[in-house]
Image (cartoon, grey):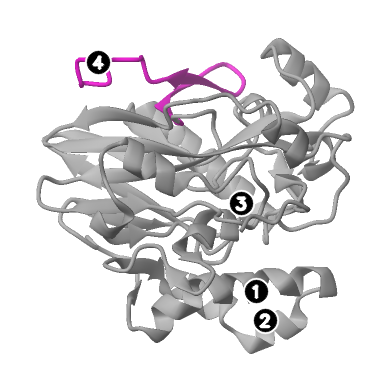
Amino acid sequence: MKKLGSLLYACLLLSIPFSGVTAQDKASHKLAQPGYYRMKLGDLEITALSDGTVPLAADQLLMNTRPGQIDSLLQYNFQALPLEASVNAYIINTGKELIMVDAGTAELYGPTLGHLPESIRAAGYKPEDIRKILITHIHTDHTGGLMEGNRMVFPNATVYISRPEVDFWFSDEQMQKAPADKKKYFIEGRTKVGPYLKAGKVKMFDYGGELLPGITPVATPGHTPGHTFYAVESKGEKILFWGDIMHVAPVQFADPAVTIRFDIDPAAAAAARIKAFKEAAQGKYWIAVDHISFPGIGHLRQKETGFEWIPVNYSTYGSGQ
């Protein structure tokens, strides 16, 4: 059962007021949306899945900003505070198996999130069909959906997580060092990932080569110690699944040096983001991001200052071009 008292995605790692807009307020005005979008990548089929959206108190979360910068960039992009943030996940259909990237939130952040299983079913699959899950990091807006109470939502899946990420969140020493208001996130991460680990369903990996055919993990520490991109290639086409390299598109594409309080190492997160943005613009490959407006897939173009997001063109033909 969803925690109706859970107010904010902004409280993922902090207790921050949320402009008077609650998840319950949003739920009362819920719009019916399809919850999935498909595109082709070489021989693969990529399906973006919506776990839902929730308001984000960007003005209280973003750091390393200039006075007036957030408001002006939001206005330029025809948006306002609180910014509604998407929580996305993705399925890679290889033709032989289904591989999912990240797992949504389940009950942790209120009734406007936790819709990943219904989006999976709307796309024509079942959670039991998922054979592998690639986790970008253990923050519970990416792993919360692994469990519903004591039940594994994806009982047939092997969960892949980088070794540095598991080592950090399952370290008693790190949890003891964490501020009191952050300890619960270690507990929640262990509650959601721990049953898979105990059942032998977690495969930890190190970097340096393909993890699965055509899929290579890329170390991007900063947001969390073991934060990981997944580069997927097929027939000369490429997409990178970025996880939480960025959270507030109108601000951080214009100024990738802007950080967020969710970052465990803000300086490293900013460096990783700037590098990723430059490489994506130069390489002209697809990127998929968990908190960009659904479906979260597109390209980047470098401008004289900052970067421009070019979202995927809606298609029923299947190319995504």
Q: Residues within 10 Å of mark 2 (few under 14, many from 20)?
A: few
- Relative depth, front residue between 291 and 130: 130
Q: Which residue is rendered at x = 62% and y = 20% of the image?
A: 305
Amino acid under disc 3:
Ala
Q: Which mark is residue 147?
A: none
User: Would you name the residue on which mark 2 appears?
Assistant: 174
Q: Quadrant of residue 106?
A: bottom right
Q: CA distance from mark 2 to mark 1?
A: 9 Å
Residue 316 in view: yes
In front: mark 3 or mark 2? 2
- Which stretch did the figure color magenta? 296-321
User: Would you name the residue on which mark 3 appears?
Assistant: 269
Q: Residues within 10 Å of mark 1 (few under 14, many from 20)?
A: many
Q: Are marks 2 and 1 in contact (CB under 8 Å)?
A: yes
- Location of residue 154 with respect to 317 vertically, above or below: below
Q: Residues within 10 Å of mark 4 (few under 14, many from 20)?
A: few
Q: CA distance from mark 4 to mark 1?
A: 42 Å
Q: CA distance from mark 2 to mark 4?
A: 48 Å
Please report whichever mark, 2 or 4, sits nearer to the chain's N-terminal start.
2
Q: Considering the numbered disc 3 on the image, is that residue within a helix, a strand or a loop?
A: helix
- Does 312 lie within the magenta span? yes
Q: Considering the numbered disc 1 on the image, is that residue within a helix, a strand or a loop?
A: helix
Please report whichever mark, 3 or 1, sits nearer to the chain's N-terminal start.
1
Please report whichever mark, 4 or 1, sits nearer to the chain's N-terminal start.
1
